[in-house]
Amino acid sequence: MRVAVDAAGGDFAPQEIVSGALRAAAEFPLIGRMYLVGPASRIREAVRQSGMRVPDKVEFVDAPEVVDMGEAPAAAVRRKKDSSIVRAVDLVRAGTADAVFSAGNTGAMVAAATLRLGRLDGISRPAIATVIPAPGKPFVLIDAGANTDCEALWLAEFAVMGNVYAREILGVDNPRIGLVSVGGEESKGNQATRAAFTMLEKSTLNFTGNVEAGDMFGGKVDVAVCDGFVGNVILKTSESVAESVSGLLKEAVSDNPLAMLGGVLLKGAFSRIRRRCDPAAYGGAPLLGVKGVCIIGHGASRADAVYNALRVVRDVEVHRVNQRIVEEIRELKERIEGQDNE
């Protein structure tokens, strides 16, 4: 497998990106070739500071421009053709690489991958699938930010892609699919979710109906389907709540000597919770529905997050996620069209 890494994207690029990528290159035999894409002088300096050995499989690709986090995505992709994001995606487009990873501007990554790689057969819009920690086991949230407004069919397609990802990557047998809405009843939601509900009922998916926040975080679904506006709000809210609860616990413990003693006794449990809630543990979120493997990292990704994101790249390739998505999207549409014609 050949991987292109945007070494200049992210809050802590290139140092953390390069360190995590070099570790993955050394430890993942399946990665046969890795391209570190970005301003060559900055990449070389990051390698020097890391003190790590550069495996023979790693090659530097000079890309003098960088898409900043605040830039308009589509305009930046059109204007900055020598940016690290565009150059990395173009390596996949040219067949030089099989997969691409970036922790840079998410919108630019979505735009570059969609416009330059194209969509898988049968896919109307690609979607970001992210793994959210929850009691018991995590669930897949799709779409986590690629599409702010969605049609009903797109939501049904997201359900299929999320189902494949949960089954193949998380190892969930017959994943339970829920449609995020404002109530559990079929009549609840907006026009798109109500129409998507009908489509998903016709599918062979294990569709459990509408779900609310308590259902998602209460272990009642394995895949939560929504548009990218709602999904991104859920994602960022869950991250903020985790940080807020951690802060509240620290305040409560520090104010009371007895609580401090209890905190010491529970230190191990708190550490385990923190690790489960740490986005770095899940690495990156795949942009499902585009040709090639495209993984998007958190903007604040450190070396561990980059390493884990490249593990996701490996897993998506090994489990042939794209091929399975194409097969199951075809089945969904045949079933919907067949029942509509009855």
Image (tube, rainbow, N blue to C red):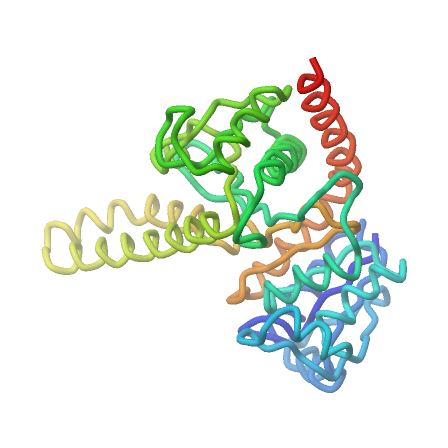
Give the residue at the far front of this rendering: 341
Using residue 333 as the reference point, say whether residue 206 is left or right of it.
Answer: left
Residue at 48 percent of width and 48 percent of height: 231
- Against 13, residue 143 (above or below) is above
Residue 83 x/y as whole percent: 72, 77
- Against 47, residue 263 (above or below) is above
Residue 316 x/y as whole percent: 72, 43
Give the residue at the far top of this rendering: 342
Hey, which quadrant is residue 7 in on the image?
Answer: bottom right
Residue at 72 percent of width and 79 percent of height: 79
Give the residue at the far right of this rendering: 95
Residue at 38 percent of width and 30 percent of height: 188
Residue 170 x/y as whole percent: 60, 35
Hey, which quadrant is residue 304 in on the image?
Answer: bottom right
Residue at 61 percent of width and 23 percent of height: 205
| Res. 170 in view | no
Using residue 83 as the reference point, say whether residue 96 is left or right of it.
Answer: right
Of residue 56 and residue 21, the one placed in the foreground of this image is 21
Using residue 289 as the reference point, say whether residue 189 is left or right of it.
Answer: left
